[in-house]
Amino acid sequence: MQRRMVLTGMVALAAARIARAQEVYPSRPVRMVVPFAPGASSDTLARLITAKAGGPLGGSFVVENRAGAGGLIAAQAVARAAPDGYTLLWGGGTAVTHAVMQANPGYDIFRDFTPVTEIAENPAVLGVRTASPLRDMAGLIEAAKRPPGLRYGSGGVGTPAHMAAAALLKVIGAEGTHVPYRGANQATLAVEQGEVDFAFAISNIALPRQQQGAVRVLCTAGSRRMTALPQVPTLAEVAPGIPAVTSTSSVVGPAGLPPEVTAKLHAAFRDAVQGDPTLRASLEAEGGEIILSESPAAYAAAWPAEVQRLRDLVRISGATIE
C-alpha cells in the first residue's frame, strides 16, 4: 500500500511538471510596472503600447504604477521579482539612471535585469514660457551669464532633465538656481506660470504644450535635430560636449527570464508598433523616434553605451542625488 502511494505521488508530480512545461505563455495577465504616477506621460505611453501589444502576445497587460524615489522603487521591485515573464518594468532607462546616480541602488544593472526590447526614444527639450523675453538659445545663454543667473526647473534632483540643465550652465560658464518638482509635468507647468525661467522636459510633454501656445522650445537634446522641429538646434550644437539626453520607451524583466518568453515579448511589442501606422504617427508627432530593437540581444548590447552616456552626463553636470 505504501509503495502504491509513493508511485501515485511520483506520477502526480511528473504530470504537474509536464503541465507546467506545456503551459502556453502567457496564461494570465502580465504585470507592467510603470515607475511613475497615473497620468504621467510615461504612464500614458505605457498603457497605449501595452494595450496594442496584448494582441500579438495572445494575452493582456495590467499596468501597475509604482511611483517613488524617481523610479527607484519600481526598478528594485522588478529586479527582485520572479523571472517568469509576469512582472516587467516599463522604461529600462530609469533603472540605468539610478545605477549611475546611486552608490547602491539595490541592484546591479547588468546582473539583475533581462533586456526585452527598446521601442522608441524621446529627446529632452528646453522650453521657456511663450511670453518670455528669451527668444532663442543665444538670448538664454546671455541672460544666464548675467547675475543672478536663471531659475530652472526639473522633474526632480538627479533626473536627466536636471543634469541636462546643470551641464548646459556649466559648459557655458553660468550659474543658476535649480527648482525641483515632483515630475516633468509639474516642471513644465512651472515654466508656463513663470515660476522658473526654463526647464528641460521630454518631448512628448513639451511639444503638445508648444502646440497649445503655452511654451516655446529653444533647443532639443537628442543626438540629431528632431523631425518635428527641424529648425530648432540641438543642445550639443549650442553647448558642444554634452551627450544626448533622452527618455527611452523600453521593456525589461528580472534576470533569468526564459529566452523563449523574452523572444515572445519582444516580438509582441515589435508587431504592435510596426503593425499600427496610427500609433507610429502619434509617437513621431510628439518627437519620438521609433527605434525597435532587432532582438533582445541587440538591446542588451546597447546597455553599456547607455550607462557610459549617463556617466558622462553626470561628470559634466556635476549633479548628484542629495
Image (tube, rainbow, N blue to C red):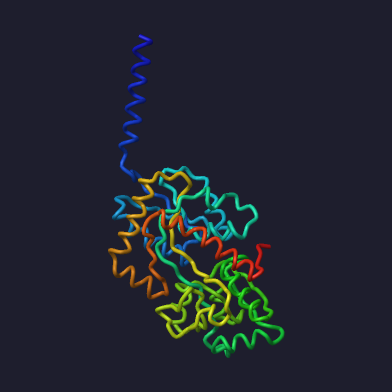
Task: Name the residue located 36 percent from the left edge and 14 percent from the top edge.
Answer: 5
Q: Would residue 196 be visible to someone looking at this image? A: yes
Query: What is the x, y in percent for residue 303?
Result: 49, 58
Quadrant position of the N terminus in the picture: top left
Pick the residue in front: 200 or 191: 200
Pick the residue in front: 62 or 251: 251
Task: Name the residue located 52 percent from the left edge and 58 percent from the top edge.
Answer: 304
Query: What is the x, y in percent for residue 203?
Result: 47, 74
Query: What is the x, y in percent for residue 250?
Result: 43, 60
Task: Please identify the residue farthest to the top as the structure is shown.
Answer: 1
Q: Is residue 223 left or right of residue 292?
A: right
Pick the residue in front: 208 or 97: 97
Query: What is the x, y in percent for residue 68?
Result: 57, 58
Task: Please identify the residue farthest to the right as the structure is shown.
Answer: 147
Quadrant position of the C terminus in the picture: bottom right
Pick the residue in front: 259 or 7: 259
Up the image or down, 135 lies above or below 94; here it is below
